[in-house]
Image (cartoon, grey):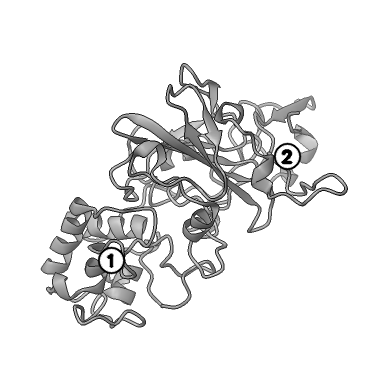
């Protein structure tokens, strides 16, 4: 059943600041035209599913929240017609400007932001999404759909998110939810459908750290500061979906070479190595790009990595995290070039080296003086 928010425009509009409720056809935060006292109804297309207080029947084992998600992708709301691949119009397709390396898999992404709420962007580096928000990511290998994952916010708490993955059938007419253990080499490809534990390691709440409070790593101020088609910072601002809209896109400091390297480290390393409560706590390394950095020297990557010693990773091949002018002596590049051992970075969800990405980082480090 749809969740409805009903309010009297003239009497309650001034009290909507906290929730940033929007009226049908009116941007969030904007006052509807005219002094009419008639009721305005805002209706979300999809209610949170499952609810945060989901409990089993008496006598049954307490299931995980993921067990209450639909067994079939066609029931999650992403598609109006999964066979024809018709995506629901409430979904916002988006593309981060910097990509997480996934062994060359092609990816498509969608976000559903409830119509009756906006995104709390009071902290521009960690957006807080309203309850009911859903993120979908599709993975294809050699043109064949393999997996579509979902992250949904079902409550206000930091752990009130559910994570699940769906594996497509051979005819690509449906995808079914996989077990929490995931699937290795799905459909005989090199693509692994991750376990729930792997999801938490990247997105947050894993016991040993990793992730960010927003949980949505690619739907952020820096990643959406572009003019490509689909949802971006400008379109979200125009639609009234940002509680604190910025004046313009955020520009990464440095020249084109530095921007490419910092963006790659942001997308592939900063998800775990950052300065939030969800960071990997064993080291003080931060490779996340904060929006307030206006010079290269102000970025966390520069301050915590460039010409800084390693803390826990001690290897004869390296002499520092990023050693100016010495790519081969830099631990970050060395670990990007490893696979199948404890030195590998990122440590999961990849079996092959990102050759283009390592070339970008190598060139940038080599040019540092």
Q: Residue at x 45, y 52 (%)?
A: 217
Give the total of numbered labels: 2
| Residue 310 as seen in the image, left or right of residue 36 | left
* Quarter holding residue 327: bottom left
Q: Is residue 68 above or below residue 246?
A: above
Mark 1–mark 2 contact, CB under 8 Å? no
* Quarter holding residue 114: top right
Point out which mark residue 359 bears: none
Q: Residue at x 78, y 40 (%)?
A: 12
Q: Position of residue 24 (x, y in %)?
A: 65, 27
Q: Residue at x 35, y 66 (%)?
A: 287
Q: Secondary structure at mark 2?
A: helix
Q: State whether residue 271 appears in this view.
A: yes
Given this view, does label 1 or label 2 mark the residue nearer the observer? 1
Q: Which residue is mark 2?
A: 13
Q: Earlier in the sequence, mark 1 or mark 2?
A: 2
* Quarter holding residue 277: bottom right
Q: Please tell me how crowded label 1 is: few (under 14), some (14-19), or many (20+) other residues with Cα within 10 Å.
A: few
Q: Residue furthest top?
A: 84
Report the quarter where the N terminus lies: top right
Report the quarter where the C terminus lies: bottom left
Q: Nearer the viewer, residue 245 or 11?
A: 245
Point out which mark residue 295 bears: 1
Q: Is residue 272 above or below residue 13?
A: below
Q: Position of residue 139 (x, y in %)?
A: 39, 38
Q: State whether residue 368 appears in this view.
A: no
Q: Residue furthest right?
A: 58
Q: Position of residue 355 (x, y in %)?
A: 19, 53
Q: Position of residue 264 (x, y in %)?
A: 29, 56
Q: Nearer the viewer, residue 34 or 345?
A: 345
């Amino acid at each position: 059943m749809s969740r409805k928010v009903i309010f009297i425009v003239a009497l309650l509009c001034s009290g909507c600041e906290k929730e940033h409720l929007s009226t049908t056809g009116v941007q969030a935060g904007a006052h509807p035209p005219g002094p009419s006292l008639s009721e305005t109804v805002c209706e979300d297309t999809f209610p949170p599913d499952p609810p945060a207080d989901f409990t089993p029947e008496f006598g049954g084992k307490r299931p995980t929240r993921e067990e209450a998600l639909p067994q079939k992708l066609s029931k999650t709301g992403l598609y109006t017609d999964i066979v024809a691949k018709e995506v629901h119009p409430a979904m916002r397709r988006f593309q981060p400007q910097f990509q997480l390396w996934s062994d060359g898999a092609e990816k498509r992404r969608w976000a559903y932001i409830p119509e009756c709420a906006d995104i709390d962007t009071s902290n521009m580096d960690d957006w807080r999404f309203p309850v009911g928000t859903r993120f979908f990511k599709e993975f294809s290998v050699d043109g064949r759909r393999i997996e579509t994952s979902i992250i949904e916010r079902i409550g206000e708490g930091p752990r009130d998110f559910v994570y699940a993955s769906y594996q497509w059938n051979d005819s690509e007419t449906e995808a079914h939810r996989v077990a929490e253990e995931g699937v290795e080499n799905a459909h005989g490809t090199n693509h692994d459908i991750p376990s729930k534990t792997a999801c938490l390691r990247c997105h947050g709440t894993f016991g040993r750290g990793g992730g960010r409070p927003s949980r949505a790593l690619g739907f952020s101020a820096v990643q959406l500061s572009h003019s490509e088609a689909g949802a971006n910072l400008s379109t979200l601002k125009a639609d009234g979906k940002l509680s604190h809209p910025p004046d313009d896109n955020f520009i990464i400091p440095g020249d084109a070479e530095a921007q490419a390297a910092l963006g790659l480290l942001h997308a592939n390393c900063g998800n775990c190595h950052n300065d939030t409560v969800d960071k990997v706590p064993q080291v003080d390394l931060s490779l996340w790009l904060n929006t307030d950095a206006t010079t290269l020297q102000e970025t966390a990557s520069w301050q915590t990595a460039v010409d800084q010693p390693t803390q826990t990773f001690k290897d004869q091949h390296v002499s520092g995290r990023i050693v100016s002018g010495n790519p081969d002596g830099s631990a970050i590049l060395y670990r990007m070039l490893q696979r199948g051992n404890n030195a590998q970075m990122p440590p999961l969800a990849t079996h092959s080296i990102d050759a283009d990405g390592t070339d970008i980082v190598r060139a940038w480090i080599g040019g540092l003086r």
